Image (spheres, rainbow, N blue to C red):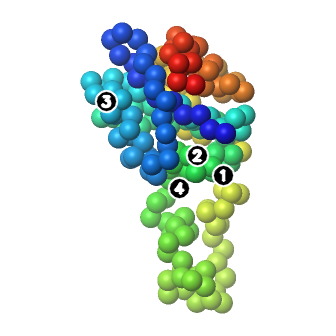
Amino acid sequence: MYFAALLARTEDGWEASDTELDDVETLSDLADLAREAAPDEDTVLVLIEQEDAWFGVVRFDGEDDARIYVSDALAAARSSYGEILLTDELLGRDPDDPGDDLDALDLDGTEDGENDNENDDTDDATGDDSLPHGPVGDRAILDDLGVSEKELLSLSGDAVGEIADALGASEVLETVR
């Protein structure tokens, strides 16, 4: 079971809205959704949680690039919502590396123009083995909002609730839960 919410920081404090991620397929889609929630270029946090398996925080500050933290990359990779957050940049992958792109494979599983009998010693970065079982991303994502790196790394269980509590936004978050 998933829970996702947007927290937008405004002049009057935090405003929460429940969000459906069914139509969100990319980080760009998520950015559009978040920026609609804060038309004045305020800080917007997207909090995503899958029970006790993993949680993610995506932060948008105006038109700046998204900052992302995922508590467990391996667990998130098994989730369609987690896949949105696990960008090549976040995972340290080269998006131009054909080893990272399943679309570059022919139907027989070889790369375009590659001989079926060639031995390829490169790592296959598309499998779960390449993902860390643990946190990835910007561990200082919430430092200026009162949640230190150490606190972020120690969160478990109801991480989204604990983050909202630390931000002083637990009451508004509960209205959308």
Circle 4 is placed at which residue position?
93
Classify residue 60 by image quadrant.
Answer: top left
Circle 3 is placed at which residue position?
62
Label 3 close to label 2 by CB (< 8 Å)? no
Chain-order first, disc 1 or disc 4: 1
C-alpha gap between disc 2 and disc 1: 7 Å
Q: Is residue 154 something one can see in this rendering?
A: yes
Question: Measured from the top left, where is residue 36 in percent x and y?
Answer: 33, 33
Chain-order first, disc 3 or disc 2: 3
Label 2 close to label 1 by CB (< 8 Å)? yes
Image quadrant where one finds the N terminus: top right
Q: Tell which tag, 3 or 1, sits nearer the viewer.
A: 1
Question: Which residue is painted at 54% across and 86% down in the image?
Answer: 114
Classify residue 109 by image quadrant.
Answer: bottom right
Circle 2 is placed at which residue position?
82
Q: Secondary structure at mark 2?
A: helix
Circle 1 is placed at which residue position?
78
Instruction: Decide: is 143 above or below 117.
Output: above
Question: Which residue is painted at 57% across and 83% down in the image?
Answer: 107
C-alpha gap between disc 4 and disc 3: 26 Å
Q: Secondary structure at mark 1?
A: loop
Chain-order first, disc 4 or disc 3: 3
Amino acid under disc 3 = Gly
